[in-house]
Amino acid sequence: MSKVCKLTGKKPISGNHVSHSNRKTKRRFVPNIQKKRFFVPELDKFVTLRVSTSAMRTINKLGVYAFVKKLESKGIETGVKL
């Protein structure tokens, strides 16, 4: 399974390990993706999503339905059917 957030689109990026002697080797920065079940009261059903923890914090603040509608109004394709 890929490490991509369904809502925000966060995915792994590359960078460098930098040692004490300043040698650089490649590494990956992977987002913290969790599988989470959310209840959508507007639709009266549960939705299971693979989202980043930062997206979970925003969902706790706004709600799933409002967050998805906000992303769609900005023109960001979420791929989530609500």
Image: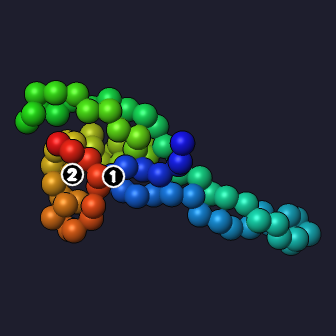
- Indicate which disc residue 56 carries: none
Where is residue 46? Give x, y as percent. 22, 28
* Image position of 56 (left or right of 68): right
Of 30 and 60, nearer the camera is 30
**What residue would you read off at disc 1?**
7
* Image position of 32 (left or right of 71): right
Label 1 SS:
loop
In terms of image quadrants, where is residue 64? top left
* Residue farthest to the left, as pictured: 42
Query: For the point 15% across and 49% down, which residue is it?
Result: 66
Label 2 SS:
helix
Amino acid type of the residue that numbered disc 2 sits on in the rendered structure: Val
Where is residue 28? Give x, y as percent. 67, 58
The answer to whether one can see residue 61 in this image is: no
**Pointer 2 local density, CA inside 10 Å: few below 14, some 14–19, many at least 20:** many
Query: For the point 17% across and 33% down, which residue is it?
Result: 40
43 over 25 or under it: above or below = above
Query: For the point 35% across and 42% down, which residue is it?
Result: 56
Amino acid type of the residue that numbered disc 1 sits on in the rendered structure: Leu
Whether tag 1 and tag 2 are in contact, CB under 8 A, the answer is yes
**Pointer 1 local density, CA inside 10 Å: few below 14, some 14–19, many at least 20:** many
**What residue would you read off at disc 2?**
68
